[in-house]
Amino acid sequence: MTHSVIELPVHADDRRIARLAALAIGLTLAEAALPSPVPGIKPGLANIVVLLVLLQYGWRAAAWVSGLRVLASGLLLGSLFAPGFWLSAAGAVTSLGVLALARHLPSHYFGPISLSVLAAFGHIGGQLALAGAWLLPGIALIKLMPVFAAAALVFGAVNGVIVARFLVSSGLEKTIQQKT
């Protein structure tokens, strides 16, 4: 009797994405432990990793890191396929869509901070769209929109500043500018 073995080759890019996804997952788990005065408002620390990956390795790598983060975090937090998981997935997909479009904007006007704010607005927009279609009546969401928009602006800007400072301190800023 012969056994067939399926071997999948693992490349350096695969290992890099796995490490970066693990970092994003760790940040998501740490963030889940933080108390929030308003349910659904979190700083989005894992988005720092996703934005760094986007700027350094491209959209495809960022999509992998983001998707793995959503899936693994849902599994580890016990919310896989629960409403919170779908809201997270909707936010991640919309945010990645916004970042895919934003890649075509002039890089001298749209750096890490503005990209982070756009991604944060995309994230909350995707979540609110799904919540409005599935969980909450539209009028309740309209009342919450200013709070969520303010949080997206503040946390998006703060996360963008963190990314910008990291790029400068690590010397990656010039490398990224040369790519664009």
Image (cartoon, grey):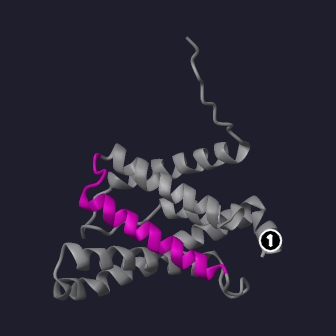
Question: Is 37 rendered above or below residue 72?
Answer: below
Residue at left offset 65%, top offset 42%: 15
Residue 176 lies, in percent from the top left, at 76, 69
User: Left or right: where does residue 108 sit relative to residue 161?
Assistant: right
Q: Is 83 a magenta residue?
A: yes
**Which three-letter amino acid code belongs to the residue tagged 1?**
Lys
Residue at left offset 63%, top offset 75%: 112
Residue 117 lies, in percent from the top left, at 51, 79
Q: What stretch is highlighted in magenta?
A: 78-103
Crowd band around label 1 with a 10 angstrom C-alpha radius: few (<14), some (14–19), many (20+): few
Residue 19 lies, in percent from the top left, at 60, 45
Residue at left offset 53%, top offset 69%: 159
Q: Is 37 a magenta residue?
A: no
In this rendered view, identify the residue nearer to me: 76 or 35.
76
**On the rendered image, what quadrant is the C terminus found in?**
bottom right
**On the rendered image, what quadrant is the N terminus found in?**
top right
Element under disc 1:
helix
Which residue is denoted by mark 1 in the rendering? 179
